[in-house]
Structures are given as structure tokens and as C-alpha cells.
Image (tube, rainbow, N blue to C red):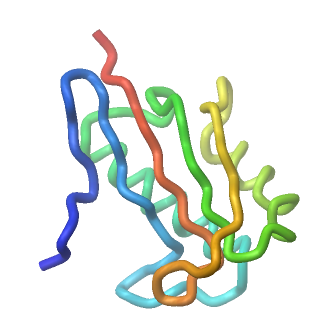
Amino acid sequence: MTPYSPYRSAGSLVAFSGQIGQRDGSLVPGGFVEELRQALANLGTLIEDAGLTRADVFKTTVFLADIADWGRLNEPYVEFFGSPLPARTALAVASLPRGARVEIEAWALRPR
């Protein structure tokens, strides 16, 4: 059992735990962009599981193993979220789980 919840609700707020680019327990091959796309797909699955849509996400935090990847973040991110984009923070960290190059967490608001 994983010692965390993939997402939790508090009233109308829903917090989604950080997702990395893994599928079937292993990082996807192909580098940063492929890991990012898989991390977003994993996040999308959780968003749907929570009964929400991508449009309900209002804030994300993106953790990068290398800040040089920041420029390659935008295109897959915009493709995934569309408009309006959630507020976003992106920052470099010393390392990520399983040697991942990117991790993304999100906050959403349930519609009333």
C-alpha cells in the first residue's frame, strides 16, 4: 500500500498528489517531454476519478529535476489544460522519486 492518498477533498477543494511520468511502475522512456506527458495523463486519470474536469484545476506546481527543461514544459502543459490555464509555479529541485525529471501536483475546485 502506498503511504499517501492520490487526492483528498476538503469541502469544495481537491488536492492531487504529485504525479511523475510512470506507467506500470516504471518511468516511461523518451526523456523529459514523454515523462511530462505521462505525468499529465496520470493526473488526468485522477481528475476524472474525482469527478472533475481539467477546467476545474486552478493551481499546479511543477517540480523539475533540471530547470533547463522549463522551456519544454509549456507546449504539453497547454495541450493538456487548454484555456483558461491554471495558475502555475515551476521550480527546480535536487531530485525526484525514481529518478524522474518532472513531477506535477494540482489543486481543483468542485463546481457548485
Residue in front for this viewpoint, 54 or 88? 88
Marker count (numbered):
0
Residue 2 placement, left or right of 31: left
Residue 41 placement, left or right of 6: right
For image coordinates 79% across by 52% down, the residue present is 75
Whether residue 81 is situated above or below residue 103 in the rendered picture: above
Spot occupied by residue 7 in the image (x, y as percentages of width and height):
27, 50
Spot occupied by residue 103 in the image (x, y as percentages of width and height):
55, 66
Residue 83 appears in which quarter of the rendering? top right
For image coordinates 22% across by 44% down, the residue present is 8
For image coordinates 66% across by 31% down, the residue present is 85
Residue in front for this viewpoint, 53 or 66? 66
Spot occupied by residue 25 in the image (x, y as percentages of width and height):
36, 87
Quadrant including the C terminus: top left
Residue 70 placement, left or right of 94: right
Residue 38 appears in which quarter of the rendering? bottom right
For image coordinates 70% across by 86% down, the residue present is 30
Spot occupied by residue 52 in the image (x, y as percentages of width and height):
34, 33
Quadrant including the N terminus: bottom left
